[in-house]
Amino acid sequence: MFNDEQKVEIFRQHRARLFGIAYRMLGTHAESEDILQEAYLKWHQINTDEIETPEAWLVTVVTRLSIDRLRKASKMRETYIGPWLPEPLVISDAPTPQEELEFASNLSMAFMILLERLSPVERAAFLLHDIFDCDYADIARIVGKTETASRQLIHRARERVRTDKPRFESNEKERQNLIKKFSIASDTGDEKTLLALFSEEVLMMSDGGGKVTAARKIVRGKVKLAHTLSMFGIKFGKSFKNFISQINGEFGLLTFHEGKIFSATTFEFTDGKISAMYRVMNPDKLKAFADLNEENFAL
């Protein structure tokens, strides 16, 4: 049986992994922390005499709590004003080896949005297998299914999140260069350059959550999007400042207005062009950036 000090240390050792599961399930920092707090309390209250593997027990509890929370959240998101996007995640500048391991797997906004296609149980089974390397027997136990049913869940989930878009294989400097060109063109209202940067079927999702003015529908097509952004840039571009930064483990754009964070934008690339933009503007989802200001960055 573990004493209280041992329990604290065990939880600390596995915290990054547990948060990684909760965040990929729920897409928000606050809810993920709530799940970890609830799991922590359960861990301290339980008699550990019959627990062979603390990590497996903790993963099970966090996953099941996340499934229940996501079921409730899914109903609430049906009435969300405009597109719903995950909360951008800031990863520490000096992550521990454990954090580096757990956050190395895909955390991109594009991936998180694809996960929204899945039911809570499908999402859990898919993540546990493909991201966290759990075997089918453990997944079956965690989600309360047979191994055969779990295999089918994971296969179905892969089919639903599969994308046939060609990947843009590039180095970090190329991605930064494209983002920088986009930043300058959108701020100056350079519609011609924006058209050249966008793929034909580019889309932009903006999440204002009803808290700030944002497009309540997905903007699709390069002509429409380039015109919309160029008009905004001509009218308001001088009052905003953009800075390239890491968002969810990939390069994105942080936009400031009057010294305060205004939006966090991430990009998807196809064949060397911008094929999707995910812009989080809801201030409730930008709290992780609240302490930042323009002096923290250099374009």
Image: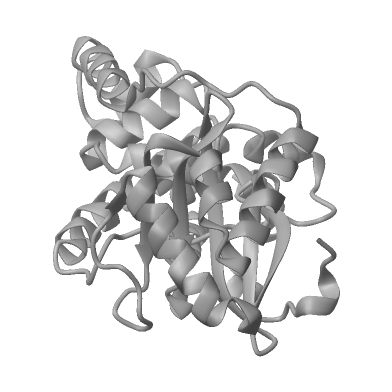
Q: Residue at x 29, y 80 (%)?
A: 210
From where the camera sits, is residue 280 visible?
Answer: no
Determine whether 235 is above or below 51 in the image.
below
Is 169 or 68 nearer to us in this picture? 169
Instruction: Indicate the quadrant where residue 216 lies.
Output: bottom left
In what quadrant of the picture does the N terminus appear?
A: top right
Instruction: Indicate the quadrant where residue 161 lies.
Output: top left
Determine whether 297 is above or below 212 in the image.
above
Q: Residue at x 21, y 63 (%)?
A: 77
Determine whether 93 is above or below 25 in the image.
below
Determine whether 139 is above or below 56 in the image.
above
Is 47 or 259 nearer to us in this picture? 259
Give the x, y percent position of residue 96: 81, 46
Q: Is residue 167 left or right of residue 282?
A: right
Q: Residue at x 78, y 77 (%)?
A: 294
Q: Residue furthest front?
A: 192
From where the camera sits, is residue 60 visible?
Answer: yes
Q: Is residue 218 left or right of residue 19?
A: left
Give the x, y percent position of residue 184: 67, 60
Give the x, y percent position of residue 69: 28, 57
Q: Residue at x 80, y 39 (%)?
A: 97
Q: Is residue 188 left or right of residue 108?
A: right
Is 6 or 220 nearer to us in this picture? 220
Is 113 or 263 nearer to us in this picture? 263
Q: Residue furthest top?
A: 148
Give the x, y percent position of residue 76: 18, 66
